Amino acid sequence: MLYSSPELLALLIVTGGILVQAWVGIGFGLLAAPLLYLLDPAYVPGPVLVLGWGLSLLVVLKQRHRLNWRRVWPAILARLPGSWCGALLLVTLTGWQLSLLFGGALLLAVWLSGRRYPIAPTPVGLTVAGFCSGLLGTATSVGGPPMALLYQYQPRLTTRDELAVFFLVGTPLSLLMLLAKGGPALLALPLVVKLLPGVALGFWLSRWLERRVHRDSVRPAILLISVLSALGVLWQGIRAGLVG
């Protein structure tokens, strides 16, 4: 399979983004989507969602014997009404209003977590985070931080593995919405096929990193990625508001 220079750059971007998410639990979409969009808008959102789902599948298959599926189910079930409400907001508010609303809400959540308010992946917390993730993911394409913030005090491997379960089941909902909206062309499967080696390489590099870096807490990384997500969504809303 031959690659052009832009395709090789896209492969490198995917590898780096997958490495971060395979290590932390989130970050692939935030890091890869804007850069891939600059190379070719067809990379977003379909291929990014499919590739991220592929990583979740790899993690779940690798860790299937130690996963706590029962704990994650409240978040998975709550994502369904959250996605529906997100779709409802899409037809009620303008895009820039949504971006400002959710970007501000995400920054508030990060600030509250910095104040060390006690949060933990309890059934109630998972239900709220799963609902917010579905809402944000459908309305703004940034659905990871609400769940990640809930897991910020958990061990790194627990965070990564249980978020992978959540995205494994939840991402197909977004893909089905894309198919219903624009058909198979939005998935851009030929682009996905060319970028799949980046998923495998990024995942392998994360395994290599695990054997050399023994760090259990990824709270700083989760907070940084969440802040960057919030600022990105806010900037998107401000820019759209000024243009509109």
Image (spheres, rainbow, N blue to C red):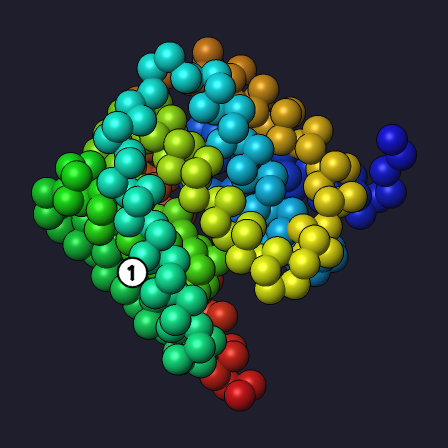
| Residue pictured at 24% horizontal, 30% vertical | 71
Is residue 175 visible in the rendered image? The answer is yes
Viewer-closest of 205 and 134: 134
Viewer-closest of 170 and 51: 170
Is residue 149 visible in the rendered image? The answer is no
Q: From what the image shows, is residue 213 above or below residue 119?
A: above
Measured from the top left, where is residue 173 in percent x and y? 48, 49
State the SS at label 1. Answer: helix
Residue 201 lies in quadrant? top right
The residue to which callout 1 is attached is 107
Q: Please state which amino acid type lies under the numbered disc 1.
A: Leu
Measured from the top left, where is residue 152 in percent x and y? 26, 37
Residue 177 falls left or right of residue 191: left
Measured from the top left, where is residue 67 in percent x and y? 34, 20
Quadrant where the N terminus lies?
top right
| Residue pictured at 41% horizontal, 17% vertical | 64
Residue 183 lies in quadrant? bottom right
| Residue pictured at 15% horizontal, 44% vertical | 124
Marker count (numbered):
1
- Extreme front residue here? 180
Mark 1 crowd level (few <14, some 14–19, many ≥20, 10 Å Cα): some
| Residue pictured at 21% horizontal, 34% vertical | 153
Viewer-closest of 176 and 59: 176
Measured from the top left, where is residue 72 in percent x and y? 29, 34
Residue 174 falls left or right of residue 98: right
Q: From what the image shows, is residue 234 above or below residue 128?
A: below
